[in-house]
Image (cartoon, coloured by chain):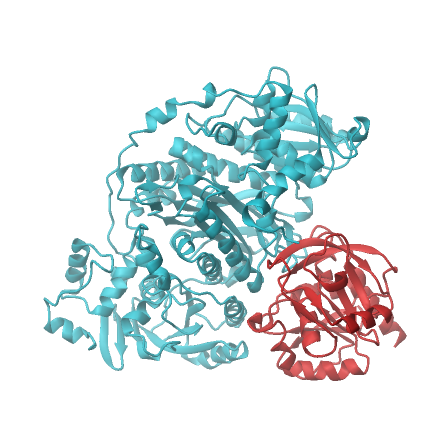
Chain colours: A cyan, B red
Amino acid sequence: MTLDTVASATNSPELPQPFAELGLRPEEFQQIRDILGRRPTSSELAMYSVMWSEHCSYKSSKVHLRQFGDKQPDGGWPQLMVGIGENAGVVDIGDGWAVTFKVESHNHPSYVEPYQGAATGVGGIVRDILSMGARPLAVMDPLRFGAAEAPDTQRVLPGIVAGIGGYGNCLGLPNIGGEVFFDPSYAGNPLVNALCVGAMRHEDLHLASAKGVGNLVVLYGARTGGDGIGGVSVLASETFDADGPAKRPSVQVGDPFMEKLLIECTLEVLAAGLVEGIQDLGGAGISCATSELASNGEGGMHVWLDRVLLRDPTLSPEEILMSESQERMCAVVQPDDIDAFQQICAKWEVEAVVIGEVTDTGRLTIDWHDQRIVDVPPRTVAHDGPVYHRPMSRPANLDALQADSADRLARPETVEELRATLLAMVATPNLASKSWITDQFDRYVLGNTVMSQPEDAGMVRIDEVSGLGVAISTDCNARFAYLDPYEGARLALAESYRNVAISGARPIAVTNCLNFGSPEDPEVMWTFAETVRGLADGCLELSIPVTGGNVSFYNSTADTAILPTPVVGVLGVIDDVARRTPMAWGPDGELIYLLGGTGPDFDGSEWARTMHGHLGGHPSRANLDQEKLLGEIAIAASRDGMVTAAHDVSDGGVAQALVEMALRADVGARVWAPDGIEAATLLWSETPGRAIMVIPRTEEMRFSQMCAARGMPAARIGVVDSGLGSDEGFDDQVLQFAGLFTIALSELRLAHEATLPRLFGSSLS
Amino acid sequence: MSSHRVGIVTFPGSLDDQDAARAVRIAGSEPVHLWHADTDLRHVDAVILPGGFSYGDYLRCGAIARFAPVMESIVDRAHTGLPVLGICNGFQILCEAGLLPGALTRNDHLHFICRDQSLRIESTSTVWTSDFNQGQEIIIPLKNGEGGYIADEATLDELENSGRIVARYVGTNPNGSRRDIAGIANPAGNVVGLMPHPEHAVENMFGPGTDGLAFFTSILRTFSRA
């Protein structure tokens, strides 16, 4: 094939070009021609097609995502150092420390090739954090699968879990939490989201911009190969159909060992002051890195593409530009510093090569063996892509769906029914123990993990001297989002906020990964718009900014979209991790309090789904003022030593929370329903804004007075008691539901812990 | 501040090196970082080979690391009594280097596993376990994909009869290790390989307790004897 140069493009203006195969629409292709005043070269076409894909350009979501920036308090967000638009947002957590975190999707690659798809999802988000100048501290993985028993879930889940572990464990980052949720709508389209958090000193913050004319552009890390070519535009922007497996070669292959070297090498060149700007290579590879660096900097860059070190020497320039080979970074380095930069790379056995230099021409020019193959305004590639106002319509079935309340479902009443429901609920895949999955992840490496799964939030120490740390939780009840997208987004935010606050940390920032069906479906688009509106409103109500995130569209198989799944991650800061509140309750005599009011809220609940196969009705509204108050009480109780344990009440209601706390502690308790609440409602209603808090007797007066003074409903519903079992003739700890039944923790544990090993193969020993 | 220097080797792909250094510091010694490509042991009094995935462990675990320049010096000094502790990947490297017999193989259930593991200390006559009580049960993290210890029967018998099994798994065997072996020593007791991670059990809240600390305080006695 002959090289398609700028000169030949000028000379053959009407040459047919495969823009449609590359995912561009005719009007988009025309827009490119208008920008360039000629047809694009094949290399330019490759660049525009990947950068203007939905995944890279956010062309369908941009008009909505603006709300995250627009809806802010007077005076802006004081804690925000870097907001949306960079590789990851950065927040000030005090003492000169800054934290950066972000969640991203790797859904489609993980369906095609579960192990590598999930592995490279971890790798990609870690490089985003690294490129801000931060040391990555921990990862989390919100995962969603089809029905647990479905054959496709059996295929993808073990591979995805092994991929996350295989990459993350070898990389040396603790995995501190996440989510696992099963629903038939994810069959054939699992959601694999990956979150990373990192920390840096304020002065170490770096941005992706190519500043300083004459500075050198260095590509370092792994060599460029043929993997992931077209991955972004092909994999992330087209719905799966029957020819899915044929796309396997598009999935990237990860090398966590190289990523570990890349982390250490990058942190060393940053610490040595050798870097003017830095960008990771993820989706769209060199096309993205060069155009974004140039667009954010002096506006111009020249690249000698033939200098790129290749794993496969037969790659064409178009393929090199599009390759999504993993474990690569791009740095802007002053000419005087390049030797020192290369020396550090050599120490870590990381290959580095100068591929270009910063110019002030306002153009991104790329040569291939001295022939000009790209000459474009970088901003048109990186930032000024198409923007769509997609048509929207409220789902036609929504009214009928909301009218179909779970109130009509028969609730358990007899002792036998209640007991059987309890055992069925703790064993249902969504509520069962996830340790079969999380025990395949290293949660200890780096030695700073304070809390990890199954705690409400993951927590890591940042400063060994002061004990300063951060807590993170990711949450989304997609059933709520399906029944009411606006409230669903606020409820996801509320739950994540609550989980962080209950651990004792003060929530300060939000990231999100918005997983949806096709934006070309007006009903999906309406749902998406409502979600963004709900999340932006909720963040304003809670006074915490969205610092970044990711949108993943086209999550559907054939005509069926997934449940709308806005995964919300909340980051909190805790002054001393020694004050954290775990979920395992302490010794005998501690008092179990339920904070927040309980109503019969079964719409969209796990109980309705598991016991009746029902999904309908209208979830309870998120009362964010109440959430804020609950958070303040939890943080104050943690700081002042008034609480020994706490647990969020959400999926599976109070019953699930109590069982998890008892099993975690391996200590029993006696619990009862407050006056006027029927047993089933207390146990399985999912009224938001609630938490269990366990209070030492000596603190009860102070705690209950604090709740009363602040108007927070707090009901004593139980007492920790390790001796109940022997009193009742059990040879084990028990949970006793006063006036109803008593059940051994061993029976609950068996039900709770057997589900995943039974579904997905052998136990881990 | 103690003047005892404990070297911690960083290979490309070492992951728990900072954690081992922290444990050494908490135990009262001075951690000294050793680089895989240097033969200079920087006058250390003991060496730890930390956990991780040296060189990615794409080949047999530890098979490449044993050829690192630093290992030549460590093997030489180990023969003349230098205390050496290999944790997880470090244990694998010690076996590959011939300082300890046997090998570590893929966990029998084929999964990576991370959990708080009960162990019984079977020998307190090594330099790394002298601060424990014989038969003491401890809990420290276990995290590996290739932790199944194997050796031929004669070797296993010899380890058993010479008191060189340092620690055994208690309860369920987590990886199919022969005779529940979690750690072994060389005949002199200065070289110990351990699959679980004592460096992750030296601070309350950051692991399952502080049971791991005694591995790092034990060598202080050796130093004071020297």
Does residue A607 appear left or right of residue A298 in this picture?
right
Front residue of this view, candidates A357 and A242: A242
Q: Is residue A427 visible?
A: yes
* Quadrant, the C terminus of chain A: bottom right
Q: Measured from the top left, where is residue A641 in percent x and y?
A: 71, 38
Residue furthest to the front: B153
Q: Please, is residue B203 above or below residue A226 in the view?
A: above
Instruction: Specify the quadrant of the image occupied by residue A572.
Output: top right
Q: What residue sits 23% from the left and 67% below the top? A: A44
Residue furthest to the top: A676
Residue furthest to the right: B225
Does residue A107 appear left or right of residue B12 in this picture?
left
Front residue of this view, candidates A330 and A687: A687
Instruction: Specify the quadrant of the image occupied by residue A405.
Output: top left
Q: Please, is residue A84 above or below residue A280 in the view?
A: above
Q: Is residue A100 visible?
A: no
Does residue B118 appear left or right of residue A397 in this picture?
right
Q: Measured from the top left, where is residue A8 in percent x and y?
A: 14, 75
Front residue of this view, candidates A339 and A7: A7
In this figure, what is the number of numbered marks?
Answer: 0
Does residue A405 appear left or right of residue B100 in this picture?
left
* Quadrant, the N terminus of chain A: bottom left
Q: Measured from the top left, where is residue A450 in percent x and y?
A: 65, 50
Instruction: Specify the quadrant of the image occupied by residue B33.
Output: bottom right
Q: Measured from the top left, where is residue B49 in percent x and y?
A: 69, 72
Q: What residue sits 33% from the left and 60% below the top? A: A246
Q: What residue sits 64% from the left and 83% below the top? A: B69
Front residue of this view, candidates A203 and A426: A426
